[in-house]
Image: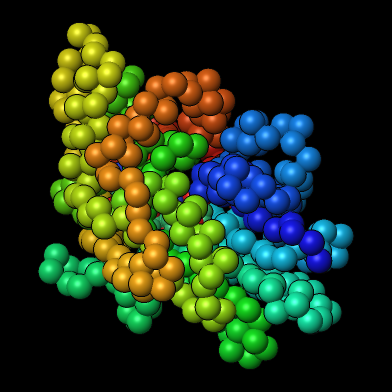
Amino acid sequence: MNDAILVTGGAGFIGSNFVLDWIQQRGTPVINLDLLTYAGNAANLQTLEGDTRHIFVRGDICDAPLVKSLLEKYQPRALVHFAAESHVDRSLVSPDTFIQTNVFGTFTLLRQAHEYWNRLTGHEREQFRFLHVSTDEVYGTLDEHDPAFSETTAYAPNSPYAASKASSDHLVRAWHHTWGLPVLTTNCSNNYGPFQFPEKLIPLMILNALEGKPLPVYGDGLNVRDWLFVGDHCTAIREVLERGRPGETYNVGGSSERANIDVVTTICDLLDEMRPNAGIGPRRNLITYVTDRPGHDRRYAINATKITHELSWHPLERFESGIRRTVAWYLDHLDWVNNVRSGAYQQWIEHNYAERLGTERQQTEQLPQ
Ligand code: NAD
Ligand code: DAU
């Protein structure tokens, strides 16, 4: 075993932020296994080109022989598992890939990591960790005055995405309980920041507002999310990996609950300030209430007391400064935006919003996987 870590999904939004952060903070090698689905983008890691500490492998976490060979070849001291299908709206349209990647993929990684760990001895066996990156959505939904989710909140996942992540959490737990595999699970709230694929609320609204397009707010816009800047999530994962107790789960959150409509108006005001456009006028006028997401969870909120007390972690970025940084990042990276908004992306936007916005056309295309 050496200092290397095996990361899955390291070309996605959080994974790529984590890999960049890891190389900068720790500087030890990262083997990055990513299938490069529509959500994965090698360009996120462009600054690591030529850096021998980053070894990119395009492949599927469901491919057991591949996972086995990577573990044998690189002898990593940890596996940090981000790879997933991650968009709730897509899980309502094509849940199959969510079950395959999030459930079967996690199972494949666990089985291979278990066999690998079984062959380790002494210090190397003691040090090995399997860190599973999960979500607060496994806990279901909160009413306005409910206490925030803690690590002991009962699981009650509501969407196919949340159910697939909950299943994967249970598998991770079982591998620890039955065989003692040294696992760690993090359940995090909504992330935002650089490299987020523009199907999610914040980047979608930034780009639509920039271009003067309608801003589709689901339902009454009063659903609440607890926003965390992605860099703070990466720090939390590093801390849990280094000092978390095997078998434990850690909730990670931003202590920044915001109603969706407040997030969208903040973005409108920032764009009016940073990119005033007389032709578009005040961006708040672009807000369009549209048909709600079926089964839409009302509120998420995280009680992060455990990770704060045990590992002294707390978020450093305030929402107001983080959202300003994020808007500025997208404005500065329009080439990146144009690259990721391929034909497949346009197909998804058409599929998800045409009916909601009343601009429906005959749809015969296959949805991108
Ligand atoms: P993302 O959709 O941006 O990226 C997912 C990455 O996984 C992509 O690079 C994709 O190519 C890769 N991938 C998908 N299927 C794969 C497969 N079968 N084999 C190998 N690679 C595959 O996701 P994200 O938003 O960065 O989320 C990363 C993880 O964090 C997920 O597990 C998600 O559930 C969890 N999470 C996300 C958030 C959030 O707000 N985005 C919050 C809490 C937890
Ligand atoms: O809570 C953690 C989860 O956060 C992660 O596990 C998921 O991977 C991540 O996608 C995110 O899930 P959400 O469903 O909360 O994120 P999304 O950005 O899709 O939506 C945020 C809120 O905004 C939600 O209440 C739905 C609403 N929304 C979303 C879109 C895309 C809109 O009103 N309009 C939109 O067009």
Q: Is residue 345 above or below residue 138?
A: above
Q: Is residue 50 above or below residue 368?
A: above
Q: Quadrant of the N terminus?
A: bottom right
How far from the left and from the top, in percent, is residue 40?
60, 42
Residue found at x 51% / y 48%: 14
Q: Nearer the viewer, residue 27 or 279?
A: 27
Q: Is residue 111 left or right of residue 131?
A: right
Tell me if residue 161 can be seen: no
Q: Is residue 329 left or right of residue 272?
A: right
Would you identify the image quadrant in which residue 84 lies? bottom right
How far from the left and from the top, in percent, is residue 24?
60, 43
Q: Residue furthest bottom?
A: 178
Residue found at x 43% / y 47%: 230
Q: Nearer the viewer, residue 171 or 304?
A: 304
Q: Is residue 194 left or right of residue 57?
A: left
Would you identify the image quadrant in which residue 124 lies? bottom right
How far from the left and from the top, in percent, is residue 182?
63, 79
Q: Is residue 175 above or below residue 109?
A: below
Q: How is the image coloured?
A: rainbow
Residue found at x 21% / y 50%: 258
Residue found at x 36% / y 67%: 308
Count of residue discs: 0
How far from the left and from the top, in percent, is residue 367?
54, 43
Tell me if residue 297 can be seen: yes
Q: Residue furthest top?
A: 278
